[in-house]
Amino acid sequence: MALTLGIDVAVRAAHQATLVRDGTTVWRGCKFSTRPTDLERLWSALDLADPGDLTVVVEPTRNAWIVLAEWFRRRGTQVVMVPTTQSADLRKYYSKHTKNDRIDSELLAGLPLLHPEGLREYSGQGPADPLRRLVKQRSTMVKRRVAVYARLDALVELLGPAWYAVLGSNYGIAALEFLARYADPNVVVRLGQGRLSRFLSARSRGAWREDHAAGLIVAAKETLALWGSEGMNFAELAEDIAHEAEQALYLTRQIKQIDERVANLYADADPDGIVASAPGVGPVISAVIAGRIGDPHRFTSLAAIRAYTGLIPKISQSGLSKIESSITKAGDPLLREMLCTAADQARKVDPQIAAKYQRLMTGDRHHDSAICHLATMLVTRIATCMRAGQPYQLRDVDGTAITESEGRAIVKQRYQLDPRQRDHVRHKLMRERRKRPARSHRSRQALQHPIPLNASLRRAPN
């Protein structure tokens, strides 16, 4: 006896459930919330002789579904997920003009019979996994800090170019501490070289001393000369710069704390360092790959892992024609970003990956497109190593095992590309893109203003 419980998960409202036995609806529209009393009441209504006979089907709606999935899994039932895009397409097929929670729960309950290959068994804790959650949080904070740096750049530009020559553009801790307190050039001049050098030396652990202090005083005097006596309210500008610098300092401290937690969680998730053994994969990228992929055995095949990254091309096939367009981007965006970054570094170490990159670029492939191919190749190898429990082994194109230093030497000797080749391909593709709109515009004009069939038969006037 096959029982299926379809649950339309809500975030704030009540969930709705439908129970199906062997394709026949037993009951529908049961409303409940994610509370122990409601869940126990629903469990009693199921009246199960064996919890293993029940399959619970849910959509991954934000993070509200994870609590339900864990509760039912602890009871011994099988929990499967269905992608929201697939359930939406089936809903349109069965009920095009109506969408409500009851229809959604009935659709989910019938999915094991309608579309069994679209179901994904729930394994792991998903968003509840700390490593998976933490690497995403780190990525968000890094992007926020980059945005703060951009705003800080725009404000420091008002002080003049001399400030960049001293502080640099990467905004270390000493530069941010200085901008948070002394962004007013009048204050810098009054502070003096002695006190300023002691401040910089303490904040930079001795890296910045009298020369940086003297350079900042010269930059402050140059700013005052550029703006004159009444050209700029430097006190208000210093306040704005201080706000941005303090945000950057706070985010930097938060990212440092997260890095320490990520390192500990990655050591627990991958004690043998299998992911970190891959070329081009550092501490951050290895934690992202391990956290976002999770258990590699939860995927049915390596092709499923590649599809999860969203790096595979879209395919449109009919008869003898087959068209592959851009990548699907249907998977994890953070994982895809880190894989592309790792692949760009791996081509400088792994001769096999470098040989493929050279072959792709020789065929007038764009650099980004070639990197996507390399990222797909790299994640396949990493997943294979994770499944086998063996570290990544660098090999030459003939299969000979090599070290990282030997790999770099081989790549430098055999697979170096002329930088002009990439520029040539980029400019060639840009020229082709410029031509396409003109042709499509003429085609649209021809469709909007067709030439009469007898136009070619008309004689020109004498």
Image: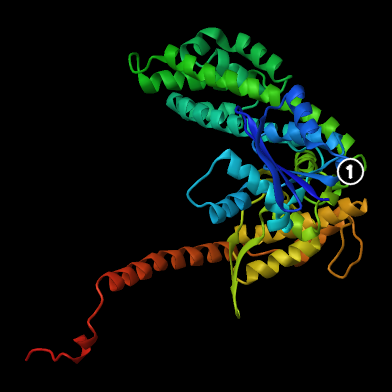
Q: Is residue 211 visible?
A: no
* Viewer-closest of 26 and 110: 26
Q: Is residue 299 visible?
A: yes
Q: Is residue 396 shown above or below 338?
A: below
Taking the spot 64% from the left edge, 30% from the top edge, the residue there is: 141
Q: Is residue 231 left or right of residue 237?
A: left
Residue to which mark 1 is pinned: 273
* Viewer-closest of 237 and 374: 374
Q: Is residue 461 left or right of residue 430?
A: left
Residue 19's x, y, as percent?
72, 43
* Viewer-closest of 80 and 318: 80
Element marked by disc 1: loop
Q: Is residue 314 shown above or below 443?
A: above
Where does the C terminus fall, quadrant-wise? bottom left
Taking the spot 64% from the left edge, 48% from the top edge, the residue there is: 107
Near mark 1 (Cα within 10 A), the count class, few <14, some 14-19 or many ≥20, is many
Taking the spot 53% from the left edge, 16% from the top edge, the residue there is: 242
Amino acid type, callout 1: Gly
Q: Is residue 176 left or right of residue 189?
A: right
Q: Quadrant of residue 352?
A: bottom right
